[in-house]
Amino acid sequence: MKLHGKHIYLRAIEPDDLDFLYELENNPDLWEVSGTLAPYSRHVLKKYLDNAHKDIFEAKQLRLCICGQDHDLLGLIDLFDFDPKNKRAGVGIVVLDSVNRDRGYGSEALSLVCDYVFHTLNLRQVYAHVGEQNKTSIHVFTKLGFKQAGVLEDWTRFGTEFRNVLLFQKLNR
C-alpha cells in the first residue's frame, strides 16, 4: 500500500526497514512520546517486523513509513488503538533528523493518513496526545483541523518532572 502526496508518500513498513526502526526505537530523545524506558534489541524488532503484515483490523494498529520522493525514509506515522466499533483511532508521528523537520513532511503525512482514516477505514474520528511543550506538533495538528479537546495534567514523566499532554481530536462529520 502506498499513499502519495506532493512531496512524500507513505508505505507499509518492510523487513528491510530494520536498521531505520532500530535507530528510531533506540533514540532516547523520542522515549518521552513513545513511553519507552529501555532500548529494543534487533531481535525483538525483527520479530515485530515479521508480524507487521497483519492488517489494522487484526493488529489494531498500522505503522507507515514516511518516504521522500527519492525513497529515503524520513519518519513514521502510526495509527494505534484502532477501534472499529466506535470508529476511532489514535495517531502518532515522528520525523527523524532535524534536517527534515519544518519542511512540511509531517503535515503532509498527517493529511494523507487522515484522508485514509476517513475515506478508506470510514472512521468518525482520529485523536492525538501531544506534549504541551511540543509547539511544532501543536501547530501541525491545529493547522490540519484538529481541535484541542482537553488537557491531561501531569500525564507524562520526563526525568523528575511531570508534564501536561494535550488531547487533540479531528472529527469527520
Image: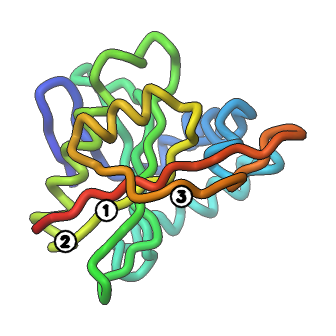
Q: Which residue is mark 3?
A: 49
Q: Residue at x 49, y 41 (%)?
A: 17
Q: Amino acid at mark 1?
A: Val
Q: Nearer the viewer, residue 104 or 158?
A: 158
Q: Report the side of 159 relative to 19 (left or right).
A: right
31 w.r.t. 172: above or below: above
Instruction: Where is residue 34? Give x, y as percent.
Output: 63, 49
Q: Are marks 3 and 1 in contact (CB under 8 Å)?
A: no
- Residue 71 coordinates in the image, percent (x, y): 30, 27
Q: Given contact means CB atoms under 8 Å apart, are the residues at marks 2 and 1 in contact?
A: no
Q: Amino acid at mark 2?
A: Leu
Tell me the kind of residue under disc 3: Leu
Specify whether 85 is left or right of 137: left
Residue at mark 1 = 126
- Furthest-right residue in view? 160
User: In percent of the image, x 39 and y 74: which residue is there?
Assistant: 82
Looking at the image, tell me whether mark 3 or mark 1 is earlier in sequence order. Answer: 3
Tell me if residue 124 comes above or below residue 62 in the rendering: below
The C terminus - image quarter: bottom left
Mark 2 lies on residue: 121
For the point 59% across and 57% down, the residue is 152
Q: Residues within 10 Å of mark 1 (few under 14, many from 20)?
A: many
In percent of the image, x 38 and y 42: which residue is there?
Answer: 65
- Sequence order check: which comes first, mark 2 or mark 3? 3
Q: How far apart are the two marked residues, 2 and 3, measured between alpha carbons?
A: 23 Å
